[in-house]
Image (cartoon, rainbow, N blue to C red):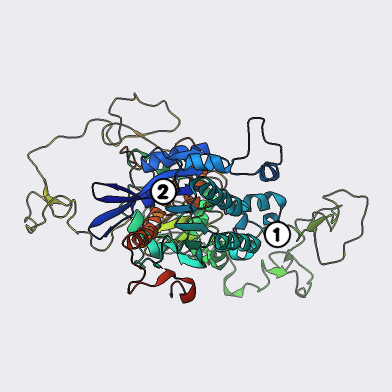
C-alpha cells in the first residue's frame, strides 16, 4: 500500500482489460475510512489487442496498458489455425511480473474473452477446438498471474475478481472446476454466482446480468467483503435524452453518426412496437396501413340529364373533384322495358343462361367472365409450378424449367432470427444488455425516440413570437426565449426577402449560381426531386414516424457507450470516441467492456475491505449483505 497526502493507494492490475471500462471505474473508486482516503493505483491493464490498449490509455488518461498475448502455443494454433510467426513467443510468469511493475497487486481483476461461452454463439461452434482454446484463457491467464506473484513476489493478491457471461456455468463447467481448484489451492475464500446485475450495482441505464467470481485471501483480509448496495436504474431516455441529436458528429464525435440502413429495414423498425422485436412483424395489421385516397365532393360526379351542368373547369376529368365530366345519358333507349339479359356477364362457375334464337350482348346473356383468359394454346399446365416439399413429385419429363413442375419449396432453408433481432427498445425503460455484436439485425439496438415532437413539461410559449399589435404574453420569472414569449414581430423592420429566397429549382434545368450563403432562406437552394420512394435495398437515413408517434431508429455507437456508462468526454476534452478502428469494431469493444460505473461501485467495496483489514478489524456489523464470508459462515452473497 502507498501513502501520499493522507491518501492510501491500493494497487490493482487488470487482465484482458480491453478499452478500459474496468480500469476507468477503479480509478474513480474511493472510500473514506479512519480519517484517510483510499483509492486505487493502476499498475497495468494487459490485452493482446494494440488498438484496444491504445484506446484504454485514451479513456483512462494514463499510460498503463501493456500489449501482451497470453495464448499458449497450442491455443494460438487452435484459434488462428496456423503456426505463430517467428517473433512470437509464449509469455512467462516473469513477463507478467514485469507488467505488474514487480509488485504483487492488492486487487487482481480478470475479464477473459467470453465469445465462446456466450449464448450468441451456436453450441456446436462453441464446442470446437478453436473456441475451446479461447475459453481456456479464463484458466491460463489467472494461473500465470498467480504464478508470477507467488514466485517473484512471495505473496498473492489479497482479492481477485473474474467477470464473464452467465452461460459460463453451463458451457464452461470444466473451466470453473479448474478455477475453483486453483483458488482453493492458494487458500482463497470464493464466491461464485451468475446473477449479478451490473446495472443495479452501478445504477446506470442497462440491464447487464453477469457471472462474477470474488475471491478473498483470509490471511490478508480476515474481514468480509460486503456487496454493493443496489441503486435505482435509469431508463434509456434518462441516459441518451441529454446527449446531442443523433447524427450530430460535430458535438457528439465520430461515433454518433447514424448507420445507413436499407429502406426495408427502416420500414420494419417503424412497424415494430416499442419493446418488441422482429416477431411482432407477424402481427402487423397491414390492411390498416394502406394508403387510402379520399377524394373531395365532386369526384366521379355524374350530372343529371335534365338539369344544368356544373361549371366547366380547366382540370375537369373523371375522378377529379373540381368539375363534372360525366352525365347520365338516357339515350340508350332501354328504359324499364329492357330485357334483363342485356349486357349480362355470366360467371364461369355457374350454369349458363338459356340460349335463345338471337343470343348477343344486347339480346341475351352471351358474355362470360372467362377465367382461362391468360392461357394460350400450347401452354403446359405445370409451367413454373412449385412442388411442396411434403408432397409426391410430378412426373419427370424431358422439358426444361418453364414447362414442367421442376421447382420445389425447400423447407431446409430456414433462417431463424434470434429474439431481440430488430428489437426496438422503449424510451422510458432500462436498456437491454449491450452486446459486442450490437447490430439491429442481432440485438435490440434501436430505440423509439420521442424527441421529434412536443413532450410533457415543454413550455407552450417556447420560442413564441408575439404580434406587435396584440397583448403581450404574461411576464414570468423564467422568461427567456426558451421558456417564455420574449420575441416580437417588429413591424418597423420591413425587409422583403431577396429574390430566390425559398426558391425551388427544376430538376431538368441547369442550376442557379451557387452563392457563399446558399441556404433555403437566402437563395434557390431547393430542388423538385422527382425520384421515387427508395428501393427496398437502397441504403440511407430516413425518418419514418411509427404508429406511436416516435422515430424508431438505431442507437448510435456513441449512445451505446453512454449506456455502458463510459464518460461523455475523454480526458483530453473531446467527445467519447475510439481511435484506429471501424464503427463495427468500436461496438464490439464497447459491448465487451465492463461498465465503468459498476466497476467503480465494486471497487469501492474492495477498498472498504482493504481499509478495514489495515485497521485490524476482523468483524463489523453492517446492513449490507455479505459478498465473500469466512469459510465457517458461508451464506448467500445477496438476496434479490
- The correct choice, above or below, for 495 with respect to 435 in the image is above
- Which residue is labeled 2 in the image? 23
| Image point (39%, 73%), residue name | 625
Q: Secondary structure at mark 2?
A: helix
492 on left or right of 336: left
**Looking at the image, can residue 183 be seen?**
yes
Residue 166 image position (x, y, % from top left) = 55, 63
Q: Nearer the viewer, residue 79 or 428?
A: 79
Residue 330 vertical placement versus 490 (above, below): below
The residue drawn where x is 93% and y is 54% is 397
Residue 18 at what x, y percent from top left?
49, 45
Dot 1 lies on which element?
Answer: loop
Q: How many marks?
A: 2
Q: Earlier in the sequence, mark 1 or mark 2?
A: 2
**What label does residue 205 carry, if any?**
none
- Counting from the top left corner in percent of width and height, residue 111 is at 51, 53
Q: Whole-percent x and y of residue 119?
A: 60, 60
Which quarter of the picture shows residue 418? bottom right
Q: Nearer the viewer, mark 1 or mark 2?
A: 2
State the image quarter where residue 451 is shown. Answer: bottom left
Q: Which residue is mark 1?
A: 414
Report the quarter where the C terminus lies: bottom left
Relative placement, left or right, of 105 versus 89 is left
Q: CA distance from mark 1 to mark 2?
A: 43 Å
Residue 450 appears anywhere in the view: no
Q: Is residue 6 left or right of residue 434?
A: left
Amino acid at each position: 500500500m502507498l501513502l501520499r497526502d493522507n491518501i492510501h493507494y491500493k494497487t490493482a492490475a487488470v487482465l484482458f482489460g480491453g478499452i478500459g471500462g474496468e480500469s476507468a471505474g477503479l480509478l474513480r473508486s474511493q472510500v473514506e475510512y479512519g480519517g484517510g482516503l483510499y483509492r486505487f493505483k493502476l499498475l497495468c491493464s494487459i490485452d493482446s489487442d494494440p488498438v484496444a490498449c491504445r484506446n484504454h490509455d485514451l479513456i483512462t488518461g494514463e499510460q498503463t496498458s501493456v500489449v501482451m498475448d497470453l495464448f499458449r502455443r497450442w491455443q494460438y494454433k487452435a484459434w488462428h489455425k496456423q503456426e505463430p510467426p517467428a517473433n512470437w513467443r509464449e509469455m512467462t510468469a516473469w513477463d507478467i511480473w514485469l507488467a505488474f511493475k514487480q509488485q504483487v497487486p492488492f486487487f487482481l481483476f480478470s475479464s477473459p474473452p467470453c465469445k465462446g461461452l456466450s449464448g450468441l454463439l451456436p453450441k456446436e461452434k462453441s464446442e470446437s477446438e478453436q473456441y475451446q482454446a479461447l475459453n481456456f484463457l479464463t484458466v491460463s491467464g489467472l494461473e500465470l498471474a498467480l504464478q508470477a506473484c507467488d514466485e517473484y513476489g512471495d505473496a498473492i493478491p489479497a482479492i481477485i475478481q473474474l467477470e464473464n457471461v452467465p452461460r459460463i456455468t453451463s458451457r464452461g463447467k470444466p473451466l470453473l472446476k479448474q478455477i475453483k481448484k486453483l483458488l482453493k489451492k492458494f487458500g482463497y475464500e470464493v464466491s461464485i454466482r451468475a446473477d449479478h446485475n451490473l446495472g443495479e450495482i452501478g445504477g446506470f441505464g442497462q440491464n447487464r446480468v453477469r457471472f462474477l467470481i470474488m475471491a478473498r485471501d483470509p490471511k490478508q483480509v480476515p474481514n468480509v467483503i460486503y456487496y454493493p448496495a443496489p441503486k435505482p436504474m435509469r431508463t434509456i431516455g434518462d441516459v441518451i435524452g441529454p446527449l446531442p441529436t443523433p447524427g450530430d458528429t460535430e458535438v457528439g464525435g465520430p461515433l454518433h453518426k447514424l448507420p445507413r440502413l436499407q429502406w426495408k429495414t427502416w420500414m420494419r423498425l417503424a412497424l415494430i412496437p416499442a419493446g418488441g422485436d422482429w416477431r411482432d412483424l407477424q402481427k402487423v395489421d397491414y390492411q390498416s396501413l394502406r394508403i387510402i385516397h379520399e377524394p373531395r365532393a365532386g369526384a366521379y360526379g355524374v350530372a343529371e340529364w335534365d338539369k344544368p351542368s356544373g361549371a366547366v373547369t380547366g382540370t375537369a376529368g373523371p375522378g377529379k373533384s373540381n368539375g363534372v365530366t360525366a352525365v347520365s345519358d338516357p339515350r340508350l333507349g332501354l328504359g324499364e322495358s329492357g330485357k334483363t339479359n342485356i349486357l349480362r356477364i355470366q360467371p364461369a362457375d355457374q350454369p349458363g343462361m338459356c340460349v335463345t334464337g338471337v343470343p348477343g350482348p344486347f339480346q341475351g346473356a352471351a358474355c362470360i367472365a372467362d377465367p382461362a383468359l391468360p392461357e394460350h394454346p400450347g401452354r403446359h399446365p405445370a409451367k413454373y409450378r412449385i412442388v411442396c416439399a411434403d408432397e409426391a413429385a410430378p412426373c419427370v419429363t424431358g422439358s426444361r424449367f418453364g414447362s414442367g413442375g421442376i421447382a420445389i419449396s425447400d423447407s431446409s432453408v430456414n433462417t431463424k432470427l434470434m429474439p431481440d433481432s430488430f428489437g426496438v427498445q422503449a424510451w422510458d425503460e432500462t436498456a437491454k444488455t449491450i452486446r459486442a455484436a450490437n447490430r439491429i439485425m442481432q440485438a435490440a439496438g434501436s430505440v423509439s425516440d420521442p424527441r421529434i415532437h412536443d413532450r410533457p413539461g415543454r413550455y407552450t410559449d417556447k420560442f413564441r413570437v408575439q404580434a406587435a399589435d396584440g397583448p403581450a404574453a404574461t411576464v414570468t420569472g423564467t422568461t427567456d426565449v426558451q421558456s417564455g414569449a420574449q420575441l416580437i414581430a417588429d413591424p418597423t423592420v420591413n425587409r422583403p426577402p431577396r429574390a430566390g429566397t425559398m426558391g425551388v429549382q427544376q430538376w431538368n434545368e441547369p442550376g442557379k449560381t451557387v452563392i457563399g450563403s446558399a441556404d433555403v432562406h437566402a437563395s434557390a437552394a431547393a430542388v423538385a426531386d422527382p425520384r421515387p420512394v427508395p428501393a427496398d435495398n437502397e441504403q440511407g437515413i430516413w425518418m419514418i414516424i411509427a404508429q406511436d408517434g416516435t422515430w424508431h431508429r438505431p442507437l448510435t455507437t456513441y449512445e451505446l457507450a453512454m449506456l455502458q456508462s463510459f464518460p461523455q468526454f475523454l480526458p483530453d476534452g473531446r467527445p467519447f470516441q475510439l481511435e484506429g478502428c471501424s464503427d463495427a469494431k468500436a461496438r464490439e469493444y464497447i459491448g465487451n467492456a465492463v461498465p465503468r460505473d459498476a466497476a467503480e461501485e465494486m471497487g469501492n467495496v474492495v477498498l472498504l475491505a482493504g481499509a478495514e483489514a489495515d485497521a485490524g478489524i476482523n468483524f463489523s456489523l453492517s446492513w449490507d449483505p455479505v459478498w465473500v464470508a469466512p469459510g465457517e459462515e458461508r451464506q448467500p452473497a445477496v438476496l434479490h
